[in-house]
Amino acid sequence: MGKEKQYWLLKTEPGEWSWDDQASNGGISNWDGVKNKQAQKNLKAMKLNDLCFFYHSGSKARRVVGVVTVAREWYDEGGEGVVDVKAVGEMRRPLDLKELKGDERLKGFQLFRQPRLSVVPVSKEVWERVCELGGGFEGDGMDDGGDDVDG
């Protein structure tokens, strides 16, 4: 019996690490710099192949812009906990925070309850709704009739 896939949201300031940064270098990077204890606990809970929304935070660009997958589970690098993530693809239509908050079906989204948390768990229902609103993401199998990677 396999483990249930988990879903997450990873926040980053686009001036520090943007989707373009993530997509370059083969799309793989380590997700580090997480200081908050709850966010670290969430990072530790991530499993290989879990999917994560890539979310630009900050005053100008609060939006879901892409999807990454966990390529390497929690490990220590220089005394800091890290996971490696790999770009899967951009959202077909990026979703602003305002639009997300306006959707009745997303009322329980933890992003709204703990807005300062940089690593947020996402329920399967919320994941599916956000993907629906954004028209999915590149690499989700919806373009080419291939396997669907989002669950």
Image (cartoon, grey):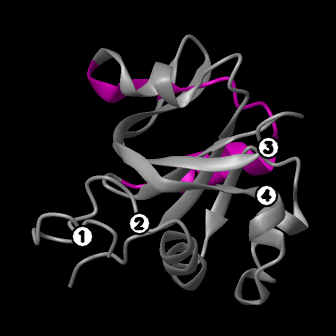
Residue, disc 4: 97
Callout 1 crowding tier (Cα within 10 Å): few <14, some 14–19, many ≥20? some
Mark number displayed over residue 142 = 1
Mark number displayed over residue 9 = none
**In terms of sequence position, does the residue under pointer 2 or pointer 1 come before the other?**
2
Q: Position of residue 84 (x, y in %)?
A: 41, 32
Pair 3/2: label in front = 2
Mark number displayed over residue 136 = 2
From the viewer's perspective, is 17 left or right of 132? Answer: right
SS at circle 3: helix
Q: CA distance from mark 2 to mark 4?
A: 17 Å
Type of amino acid at the residue the image marks with label 1? Met
**In terms of sequence position, does the residue under pointer 2 or pointer 4 come before the other?**
4
Whether residue 28 is visible to the viewer of this picture, yes or no, is yes
Callout 3 crowding tier (Cα within 10 Å): few <14, some 14–19, many ≥20? few
Q: CA distance from mark 2 to mark 1?
A: 8 Å
